[in-house]
């Protein structure tokens, strides 16, 4: 654990309620030539938003940035039709100290939205929520991970966050050699745990691929995860479970449809190893249904809800509270998405870690530049906000939006 | 039941595969001054789409129309960003007889969409799916209800569909008199069953309102439904359940969050009367979870999934198949939305009926003009397609889109 929180004296206070002065959004490609067992990522896009405020730091207005992670698309229509206009029109968003209260902003964005149907709009709200937290942490003059630790975790932030390298793609024609090379690159980058796609070819071929990857990580199943992307029916999920059970893999990810809780329960009754899922559950209610009805096991299974796709951190805090109520530690959470927002949350709130995509989804994935990965762990920068300014390729996309 | 299906001779065949030639969309207000216990409808919008084809009938290209029903918003961004472009780019959509196969169109629209997160995009796909079915029925020269009965129901369509009048709003200041007047108007229009909002004021006041409405329908609880719009927690839902139990109401609608299956189960263990829900479940998977985990009762409860908001009829057919597998009759289904699309489905596939909004959401709700409601039942027109052309106020919105 790091030391006590920064003292109040090192932080900024503000003299009048912090206000939003401008919101802009752009759409950029988040493309990648890869495909998983379910979709092709080549047309994928991300919205990037900039929320400018009337708080001045270093002579410039504090501006928060947000974006959506991969797997869903840029929600530009939704942002412009409903969520940006509502956020702009909202009044009295400040907390007791005058900073914007993201929970109040959330309520303003979600007014006149009916319950249920948590998809797409959860991405639009998630993008704006990320930018609000970035702005608030910058206005307060602290890294987001520190702000979160102080507000919600008794001031205790982790020294480093566990990260793993997600990849392990298919290489038609030169399958095993290329997979092995890819996995070796991740080890060279400092990752000790890697993840590979399965479910895109027949079981026998996937087993050969898994054995190849396993050899790269020294035969230690705890250093290898496999990811189906929700494609299997029960029979196939069980066939694969039987094949991989002797390997003691780190986890078996999204084996079946993310909303088929009963199938998760059936699989968990047969497969003793850890199951990971949740990247396609976009609300506290959906995550709660997984916990209630999926028969997952609080001592081993992994929950991958991604705050950037799921109504942001305001909702993620509700999800963490729900998990606690059901006897689940935040350490069981390892968010999907590989972005710095989740990395701040992981460090500040004591999650189990965060996904990382060393090869794809640039410039949105990854960490601050010059942050070495050491034994699959990274340390967070000390700069205010989420830390986008310390990641040049990403900040090059964001910076032109300031004062635009 | 009506007689046998129209003979093949009365139908049109086509000589080459039916193609989409143009897709246009507009956004129109679907506003209403009402509010329910959850949201204000004054800013609500609907997308209307027109899908023009290369099939010529009466000298003009067959054009199908679709729109989203109330409760969610016009999905214009999603339509233009993803679903219209994919549908336009799709090839080989025809079925064995050369007509467009809506299931193939559905697969084309949903390519590169990940599983889970069923909201918003389900509305965009639903709007286009509605237009495709309208176009296909027009190309075939039959009403949609008849096409559906022939394809999926052994040629058996119902003579009429049961409909009920949804309304029963709050009238601050002149509560009971205005509510009573509203309910009387519905009876004058030919409805025998009416529905009213509850949950917007304290229980005691709602009970007075319920008693007032009950008096209008002659004291027969089977002619009155109450609708909470998902607002109650368990304690409040149980308090209301206890208060209304002696009245034997037709149904107690959306008492709790639509995704809180456990809460439905708890309520169903205490409340013996029919519970209705489902208007905010937008996929087969979500509906299946309600059936699996909600402990609803196949002999009395009501399922209100709305095809216009839920990926259209292609998905609704999957939902009906899932229900059958779980022992539920289609008669337990009474869709939300009050539109002619669901009315065709109800008539052609033998559902329990359809919602109707005599006072609000014009021009999208309701039936063909000059269709009398008699003892809460309506008869479908014999014109090809969904029947929009027989409803002047709605067709006035659609007609300018043709050839636009």
Image (spheres, coloured by chain):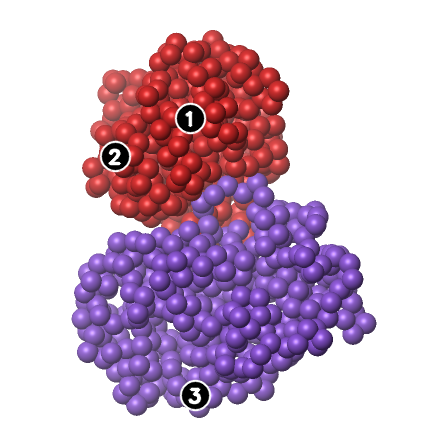
Chain colours: A red, B purple
Q: A13 or A28, which lies in front?
A: A28
Closer mark to the observer between disc 1 and disc 3 = 1
Question: Which label sits on residue A297?
Answer: 2
Q: A397 or B302, which lies in front?
A: B302
Question: Which label sits on residue B375?
Answer: 3
SS class, disc 1: strand
- Classed neighbour count for the residue bearing mark 2: other residues with Cα under 10 Å, few (<14), some (14–19), many (≥20): some
- Classed neighbour count for the residue bearing mark 3: other residues with Cα under 10 Å, few (<14), some (14–19), many (≥20): some
Q: Chain of mark 1?
A: A
Image marks 2 and 1: residues in contact by CB distance under 8 Å: no
Q: Let me know if marks 2 and 1 both belong to one chain.
A: yes
Q: Chain of mark 3?
A: B
Q: Position of residue B391 (x, y in %)?
A: 62, 78
Give the CA distance from mark 2 to mark 1: 18 Å
SS class, disc 2: loop
Question: Would you say residue B9 is visible in this rendering?
Answer: yes
| Residue at horizontal 26 percent and vertical 54 percent from the top | B262
Q: Earlier in the sequence, mark 2 or mark 1?
A: 1
Q: Position of residue A69 (x, y in %)?
A: 49, 34
- Classed neighbour count for the residue bearing mark 1: other residues with Cα under 10 Å, few (<14), some (14–19), many (≥20): many
Left or right: residue B46 versus residue A319 is right
Q: Let me know if marks 1 and 3 both belong to one chain.
A: no
Q: B33 or A399, which lies in front?
A: B33
| Residue at horizontal 53 percent and vertical 47 percent from the top | A79
Image marks 1 and 3: residues in contact by CB distance under 8 Å: no
SS class, disc 3: loop
**Residue hosting label 1:** A226
């Amino acid at each position: 654990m790091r030391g006590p929180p920064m003292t109040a004296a090192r932080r900024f206070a503000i003299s009048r309620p912090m206000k939003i002065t401008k919101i802009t959004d752009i759409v950029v490609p988040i493309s990648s030539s890869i495909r998983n067992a379910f979709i092709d990522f080549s047309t994928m896009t991300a919205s990037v938003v900039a929320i400018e405020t009337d708080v001045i730091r270093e002579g410039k207005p504090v501006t928060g940035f947000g974006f959506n992670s991969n797997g869903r698309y840029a929600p530009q229509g939704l942002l412009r039709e409903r969520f940006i206009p509502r956020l702009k029109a909202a009044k009295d968003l400040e907390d007791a100290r005058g900073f914007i209260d993201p929970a109040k902003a959330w309520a303003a964005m979600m007014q006149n939205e009916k319950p249920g149907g948590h998809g797409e709009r959860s991405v639009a709200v998630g993008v704006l929520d990320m930018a609000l937290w970035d702005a608030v942490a910058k206005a307060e003059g602290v890294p987001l991970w520190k702000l979160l630790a102080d507000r919600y975790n008794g001031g205790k932030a982790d020294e480093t966050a566990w990260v793993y390298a997600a990849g392990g793609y298919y290489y038609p024609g030169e399958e095993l050699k290329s997979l092995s090379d890819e996995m070796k690159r991740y080890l060279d980058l400092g990752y000790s745990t890697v993840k590979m796609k399965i479910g895109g070819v027949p079981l026998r071929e996937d087993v050969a691929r898994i054995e190849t990857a396993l050899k790269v990580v020294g035969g230690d199943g705890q250093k290898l995860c496999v990811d189906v992307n929700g494609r299997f029916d029960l029979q196939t999920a069980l066939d694969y479970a039987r094949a991989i059970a002797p390997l003691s893999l780190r986890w078996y990810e999204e084996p079946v449809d993310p909303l088929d809780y009963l199938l998760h329960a059936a699989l968990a009754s047969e497969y003793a190893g850890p199951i990971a899922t949740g990247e396609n559950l976009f609300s506290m209610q959906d995550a709660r249904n997984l916990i209630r009805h999926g028969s997952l096991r609080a001592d081993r299974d992994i929950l991958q809800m991604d705050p950037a796709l799921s109504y942001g951190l305001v909702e993620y805090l509700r999800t963490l509270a729900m998990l606690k109520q059901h006897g689940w530690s935040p350490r069981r959470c390892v968010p999907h998405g590989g972005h710095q927002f989740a990395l701040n949350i992981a460090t500040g709130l004591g999650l189990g870690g965060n996904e990382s995509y060393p090869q794809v989804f640039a410039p949105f994935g990854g960490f601050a530049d010059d942050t070495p990965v050491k034994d699959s762990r990274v340390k967070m920068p000390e700069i205010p906000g989420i830390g986008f300014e310390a990641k040049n390729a990403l900040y090059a996309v964001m910076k032109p939006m300031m004062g635009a």
